[in-house]
Image (cartoon, grey):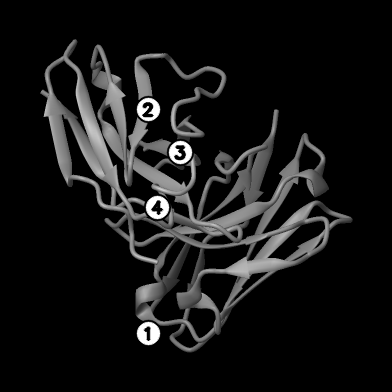
Amino acid sequence: QVQLVQSGAEVKWPGASVRVSCKASAYTFNDHYVNWVRQAPGQGLEWMGIINPFSGSATYAQRFQDRVTMTRDTSTSTVYLDLSSLRFEDTAVYYCARMGISYYLDYWGQGTLVTVSS
Amino acid sequence: QSALTQPRSVSGSPGQSVTISCTGTSSDVGYYNYVSWYQQHPGKAPKLLIYDVSKWPSGVPDRFSGSKSGNSASLTISGLQAEDEADYYCCSYAGSYSYVFGSGTKVTVL
């Protein structure tokens, strides 16, 4: 059974950085791109970017270009989301989601709550 | 990239049909046949319902159906059931490995 298991909740100060991990299992890691999607409290889904686990190359949504980095570790089948210069409005649940054989997101992680608070 | 436009809410009685619209542009919904739909219950991760405009992943009942015309896509839920009460999001591929989600629609079963 394909699974994406994410790291636990985080509480960060404004201006800090956060790293969220997403460990994949039960499929060939290199064969599927992984997306990151976030959801602020009471709000909709927002696409943040995508990483190719084979090459490590990533594409980011324009509004996050200067603050986000997506990386992967093929030895552990894990992808990482790093978000810097955190603001209160970055408080959200962050999801990783696998891209299927076409352009859709077929398996999702359980979500990681990141709270930015002073 | 602006969010795709969905109605904030739709409602229906059990057994009825409801349709959720999703309006984009000629650069996303109108250009690519890669519209997908997701169901999200409170506190849960989204679940894939429809992909490539009108295809079903394994395990999704055919009460859920998708279509597209021009810059707009639609999700129809037939034979509405209590467990269909949830938030629904459309999503379109927008080229160069980028995506845009819809604003989300809350479905209420009366």
Q: Residues within 10 Å of mark 4 (few under 14, many from 20)?
A: many
Q: Determine which residue is flagged by label 3.
A: B36
Q: Is the same chain shared between marks 4 and 1?
A: no
Q: Residue B80's image quarter?
A: top left
Residues packed near mark 1 inside 10 Å, few (<14), some (14 to 19) or many (20 plus): few
Residue at 54% over, 59% down = B98
Q: Spatial distance from mark 3 to mark 1, Cα to Cα?
A: 38 Å
- Dot 2: what SS? strand
**Crowding near the residue tagged with mark 2, few <14, some 14–19, many ≥20 C-alpha atoms within 10 Å:** many
Does label 3 lie on the same chain as label 2? yes
Q: Which residue is mark 1?
A: A118
- Residue bearing the label numbered 4: B101
SS at badge 3: strand
- Residue found at the very far right of the displayed protein: A75
Q: How far apart are the two marked residues, 4 and 3, measured between alpha carbons? A: 9 Å
In the rendered view, tell whether residue B10 sits above or below residue A63.
above
Disc 3 versus disc 1: nearer the observer = 3
Vertical relation: B107 (above or below) A14: above
**Marks 2 and 1, how far apart at CA:** 44 Å
Mark 3 surroundings within 10 Å by alpha-carbon count, few (fewer than 14), some (14 through 19), many (20 or more) = many
- Disc 3 sits on a residue from what chain? B
Q: Say which of marks 2 and 4 sits in front.
A: 2
In front here: B10 or A78? B10
Please give the count of numbered marks on the rendered protein.
Answer: 4
Lower position in the chain sequence, tag 2 or tag 4? 2
Q: Answer left or right for A28 relative to A66.
A: right
The residue indicated by pointer 2 is: B66
